[in-house]
Amino acid sequence: MLDHIKIENVLFLDIETVPQYSDFEKVPEVFKQFWEKKSSFFRDEEQTASDVYQRAGIYAEYGKIICISVGIIIQKEGEQFIRLKSFYGDDEKNLLNEFAGMLHKFYAKNNSIYLCAHNGKEFDFPYISRRMLVNGIQLPVVLDVAGKKPWEVTFLDTMELWKFGDYKHYTSLNLLTNIFNIPTPKDDIDGSMVADVYWKEQDLNRIVIYCEKDVLAVAQLFLRYQGKPLIDPEHVESATD
């Protein structure tokens, strides 16, 4: 499976997002009204828009990116290593500019680049693209998919690959890592806790570590799909350390 894809051409990534404001009361009035309407589709009758505001982080119109972690697999002395790097901070525009700069350089060296994430086609890739546009950042070539034919879009999605054409099925990264005996990235926090860790605990470094674990897990899962051995824990290199 996926034998036609060279692993060194794949940039694995994951993002962490939070609501744009620490609580609903700080949201500008016009966006409170937008959120009232948006949240009416999924909140319970007894819940208010404020009660479900923590979910705002999953929507690019109401949330922001606080971390993008990436990883590339390289060969050294006949063994596989993965290099991880994170772009993070409170200033979303700054981290997106840095990430875009990295993509430009990576694409200039290798225009056969693929981007790979779990549920990336539904979440990570469009979210990054939308927030770049909101922040006035030109989309890197690999993210600028408008007008491209389906086979020209170089997005890989480990969740979609697991579906094998079954569009009604969702499988979490946590479940797949357990199925394939890959160390779980959810041994500290999970996505539902990120907003509180960011806004209440103000522990961004903890989120960065979690994000990089997700990237490693996606890369390991992709290797499993290719029938290749997992990366040894001692062969994980992080520029964030």
Image (tube, rainbow, N blue to C red):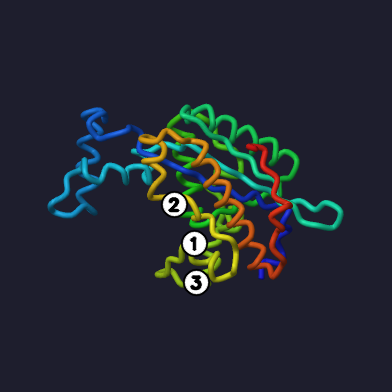
Q: Nearer the viewer, residue 68 or 121?
A: 68
Residue at screen point 47% across, 27% down: 91
Amino acid type, residue under disc 1 in the picture = Asn
Upstream in the sequence, badge 3 or badge 1? 3
* Residue topped by disc 3: 165
Upstream in the sequence, badge 3 or badge 2? 3
- Above or below 19: residue 187: below
* Residue topped by disc 2: 190
Circle 3 — which element?
A: loop
Circle 1 — which element?
A: helix
In the picture, the quarter occupied by the C terminus is: top right
Q: Are marks 1 and 2 in contact (CB under 8 Å)?
A: yes
Circle 2 — which element?
A: loop
Amino acid type, residue under disc 3 in the picture = Gly
Q: Nearer the viewer, residue 213 or 156?
A: 213
Distance from disc 3 to disc 1, alpha carbons, whole Å, reads 21 Å
Q: Is 101 on the left-hand or right-hand side of 199?
A: right
From the image, state whether disc 3 or disc 1 is nearer to you.
1
